């Protein structure tokens, strides 16, 4: 086995960090030609699935603070990928929507993201990925429950 990305421990958190870091680097590489970060892409995909949601909801879904989300949204607005509109029900509330350009970009990127994920799934012996994914999600849910910090959906 090659050296771990972060050495010095074989603890589960370090193992998960290494897995995440490697996937993050590969996903970043794939997104570079589109001028997007992994985090920005996450927001775009969230809006693709639930267009017209509040910035607060986006922050919670992205597990980011509102200030960080505001900065990311500003960059996406500047790129013409999203727009803010007043809520028809409450004029004090801004809702975030994908533009046509943003929707087309998500439709272009999503298959490539799935290809990147498939490259990692192929590393598992047949049948083991589903088990690993289920166990990892359970572990994550328990961690979130223990910490009690984020609203996880």
Image (tube, helix red, strand yellow):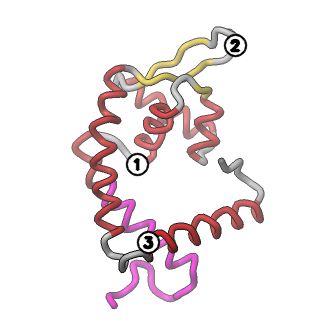
Quarter of the image with the N terminus is: bottom left
- Residue 137, position in %: x, y? 59, 64
The residue that label 1 is drawn on is 38
Query: Disc 1 to disc 2, how far (Cα)?
Result: 30 Å
- Bounds of the magenta segment: 1-28
Is residue 113 found inside the magenta-colored segment of the image? no
User: In this view of the protein, which residue sits in the foreground, 140 or 60?
Assistant: 140
On screen, residue 137 versus residue 103, left or right, reads: right
Q: What label does residue 129 carry, if any?
A: 3
User: In this view of the protein, which residue sits in the foreground, 43 or 116?
Assistant: 116
The residue that label 2 is drawn on is 92
Q: In the image as oriented, which residue stretches furthest toward the left? A: 33
Q: Looking at the image, is 92 positioned above or below residue 34?
A: above
- Residue 2, position in %: x, y? 32, 88
From the image, state whether disc 3 or disc 2 is nearer to you.
Answer: 3
Q: Residue at x 64, y 42 (%)?
A: 60
């Amino acid at each position: 086995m090659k050296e771990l990305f972060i050495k010095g421990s074989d603890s589960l958190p370090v193992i998960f960090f290494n897995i995440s870091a490697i996937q993050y680097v590969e996903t970043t590489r794939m997104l570079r030609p589109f001028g997007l970060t992994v985090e920005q892409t996450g927001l775009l995909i969230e809006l693709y699935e639930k267009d017209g949601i509040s910035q607060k909801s986006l922050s919670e879904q992205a597990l980011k603070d509102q200030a960080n989300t505001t900065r990311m949204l500003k960059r996406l607005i500047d790129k013409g990928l999203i727009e803010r509109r007043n809520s028809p029900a409450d004029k004090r509330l801004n809702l975030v929507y994908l533009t046509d350009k943003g929707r087309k970009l998500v439709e272009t990127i999503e298959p490539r993201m799935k290809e990147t994920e498939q490259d990692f799934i192929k590393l598992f012996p047949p049948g083991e990925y589903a088990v690993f994914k289920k166990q990892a999600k359970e572990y994550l849910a328990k961690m979130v429950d223990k910490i009690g910090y984020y609203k996880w959906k």
